[in-house]
Amino acid sequence: MQYVSTRATSASAARNPQSFSDILLAGLAPDGGLYLPAEYPQVTGAELDAWRKLSYAELAYEILRKFATDIPDADLRDLTARTYTPEVYRNARADESGADITPLRVLEDGANGKLVLQALSNGPTLAFKDMAMQLLGNLFEYALARNDDELNIFGATSGDTGSAAEYAMRGKRGVRVFMLSPHRKMSAFQTAQMFSLQDPNIFNIAVEGVFDDCQDLVKAVSNDLEFKARHKIGTVNSINWARVVAQVVYYFRGYLAATTNNEQKVSFTVPSGNFGNVCAGHIARMMGLPIERLIVATNENDVLDEFFRTGVYRVRASNETLHTSSPSMDISKASNFERFVYELVGRDAERTHALFRKVETHGGFDLSGAPGSDGDEFKLVAQYGFASGRSTHADRLATIRDVQRQYGITIDTHTADGVKVAREHVQPGVPMIVLETALAAKFNETIVEALGQDAARPAGFENIEALAQRFVVMQPDVGLMKAYIAERTGL
C-alpha cells in the first residue's frame, strides 16, 4: 500500500508514493497536501461474512492490515489487541456490555424507518476521538522505539481531540504534546480534562481566538519544512492519515452489527465540523462497505452543509465563526474536506491544489456549475452518497429533551445535532446509524438548560473541574509558537 498527497503535482515534493510508516509521523505532506492511498483496498463479501464473528480488536487488525502493509502482521495484531480492550474502553453505562466496544441502541423502528445510535464514547476521555487516538498513541510509540527516535506533536482542538490525544500520549516514550485550543471556548469539562493533566510531556496552549486560528497555526508550522524536520514535528489531528483510517473500523463494526447479510445497506449520520469523522465513512464506502448515504450534520457553523446543498465552499472569517453549545463543531475550515474534494475532481492534484489555494486567497470556491464558478463537479456529489443538514441551539435542546423523554437516554449536544438531522433523512428499509460523539457530561451546561438537571458522570470524573490546571495563554502568532516549542524541545 502506497500513499500520495492530494497536492502531488509534477513539481510537488511529495509526488513519490510513501509507505504507511513513512507518513505515520508526518501529518501534512511536504507540499501542504493530505495523504491518501494511491488506491483504496477493496473488501469482499466473503471478508464481510467472516468479520461478523470478530471482536473489535480483531476487526481493527483485519482492516488496518490492508493499509499498514509495511508493519509486520504479528506486530499489528499485538497493537490492536492492546488498544481495543474492555479495560481501555471501559463501559460508562450499566446497560451495555463492556465486551462490546461500540454497542448499537435502537431508538426508533417504525414505518418511517429505523434510527440507531452507535456508542463511541466508552474510551478514557468519553468521546469518539478515543477510538482512533488510543491506537495512534500505541502506533507512535511502536514506530519511535523501532527507530530510537522522538516526536513533538503539535495539534489543535476544538474540544475533544486535545484530551483524547493527551490521554493517549501521556507517558509515551519519546513523545511530547503541544496542544492548541481556543481560549474560553470549550466546555468546562473539556477544559478541565486537558488542563488538569500534569504530565511533563504535555503542554497546553490556550490561543486568543477560535479553533480555525489554532488549526492555521498547526498548518503554518507544519509547512515550515526546515523547522518541522529540525524539531521533529508531527500531528494527531485528523490531517494525520493513521487517525482517519483507525476511524474506518467503527463504520464496519456498525454496519456488521446492524445487518444480517451483505445485501442490506445502512446509512450513517455524522456530526461534523472538520470532516474527519465522516471522511472515514467515505473511505469505508470507497472500500466497498454497503453504505447507502452519509449524512453530514452541522451546527450553526454550517460551511459543510452549505457545500452539500449548493456546491459552494465558503470559509467564514474568525469573527464569523459562532461559539455554540456544540463547540467541538465550531469550525469553518474543514481540513479533511480536501481529501473528498480530491476524489470529487477525479484525483486531479493540480486542480485540488488550485482550489485550496483559492480558499486561502479568496475564502473558498464554487463547484456548482453556475456562470463564473470554478467548476461543475457538485453534480457528482450524490454518487458518493453525501447529503447534509443543519441544527441550531433550539434544535439541540428540543432533541435532548425528546430523546430523554422517549428513551430515557441523555445524549450530548453534538449527538443531538446528529439525531435531529438524521430524522430528516431516514428512509424505510435502510437503518440510519447516528454516530454518538461524547457523553453528555462533557457538555453539562446545556444538559442543565435542556433537562433542568445535571448529566450523570462516570466514576472518576465527579469533580474534574476542581482539579488544578496547567496551561499558558498565547496570541495566535506563528513566531511565538515556534519559539515556545523550540525552548521546550531543546532541538
Image: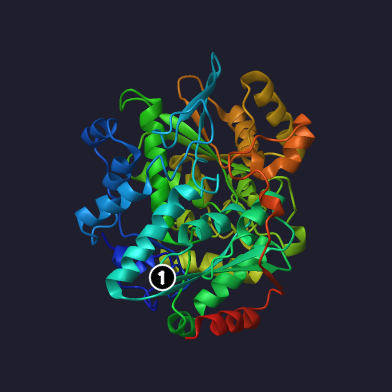
Q: Which residue is drawn at 66% across and 55% down?
A: 192
Q: In which quarter of the image is residue 296?
A: top right
The one nearer the camera, 151 or 46, is 151
Please report the residue visible at 31 percent of the width from the left and 63 percent of the height from the top.
20
419 sits to left or right of 353? right
Q: Which residue: 31% across, 70% down?
A: 145
The residue closer to the viewer here, 159 or 452, is: 452
Does any portion of residue 162 appear in the rendered image?
A: yes
Placement of 421 over or under 89, stated as above or below? above
Q: Quadrant of residue 50?
A: top left
Q: Mark 1 points at which residue?
A: 26
The location of residue 46, given as percent across then percent down, is: 21, 33
- Element at badge 1? loop
Rendering coords of residue 198 (x, y %): 58, 65
Please state, as top left, top right, bottom left or bottom right, where the N terminus lies in the image: bottom left
On screen, residue 257 above or below 32: above
Give the x, y percent position of residue 120. Answer: 50, 40
Q: Residue at x 43, y 45 (%)?
A: 88
Q: Is residue 198 above or below residue 189?
A: below
Q: In which quarter of the image is residue 6?
A: bottom left
Kindly identify the amino acid type of the residue bearing the numbered disc 1.
Ala
